[in-house]
Image (cartoon, rainbow, N blue to C red):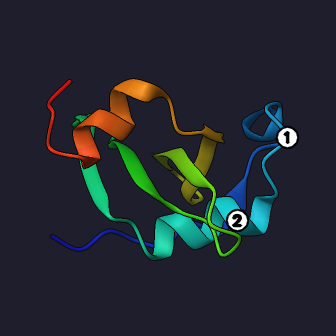
Amino acid sequence: MWYNIPEIVLRSALKHGVNPNDALYVTERPIVTLVMEEEPLKILHLGISPEGIPLEVVTIRTSRGDAVIHAMRMRTKYVKLLEGGGR
């Protein structure tokens, strides 16, 4: 499945201290991508930043394109998902 690469990073998405370039990197190179909602399209991207930090990044489809609305260090439940342990 192909998704647009977001170009918009909302300021509120960075409240957990994630570098916007790292958030965009994960959306471009996710390990796992999950659709959270269909309308509007909301996607969870799980991946590793260039510095090796596991991140969870959420994007949403807007009239201006896809936007990053959430970015933070990956929570344990998602680390377990990546490791094959489920939610």
Res 70 visible = yes
Instruction: Work out whether 61 lies above or below 29.
Output: above
Q: Residue at x 14, y 30 (%)?
A: 86
Kind of residue at badge 1: Gly
Location of residue 87 in the rendering, given as x and y in whole percent from the top left corner: 21, 24
Residue at 36% x, 45% y is 43
The residue located at (71%, 70%) in the rendering is 51
- Residue 40 seen in render: no
Q: Nearer the viewer, residue 60 or 25?
A: 25
Separation of disc 1 and disc 2 at Cα?
Answer: 11 Å
Residue 17 marker: 1
* Residue denoted by label 2: 22
Q: Position of residue 58 (x, y in %)?
A: 49, 42
- On the image, which quarter does residue 22 sit in? bottom right
Q: Label 1's element?
A: loop
Residue 72, position as x, y percentages in the image: 65, 38
Q: Does dot 2 land on a helix, a strand or a loop?
A: helix
Q: Nearer the viewer, residue 30 or 1?
A: 30
Judged left or right of residue 81, residue 41 is: right
Between 85 and 40, the residue placed more toward the observer is 85
Q: Which mark is residue 56?
A: none
Q: Are marks 1 and 2 in contact (CB under 8 Å)?
A: no
- What residue type is disc 2 on? Asp
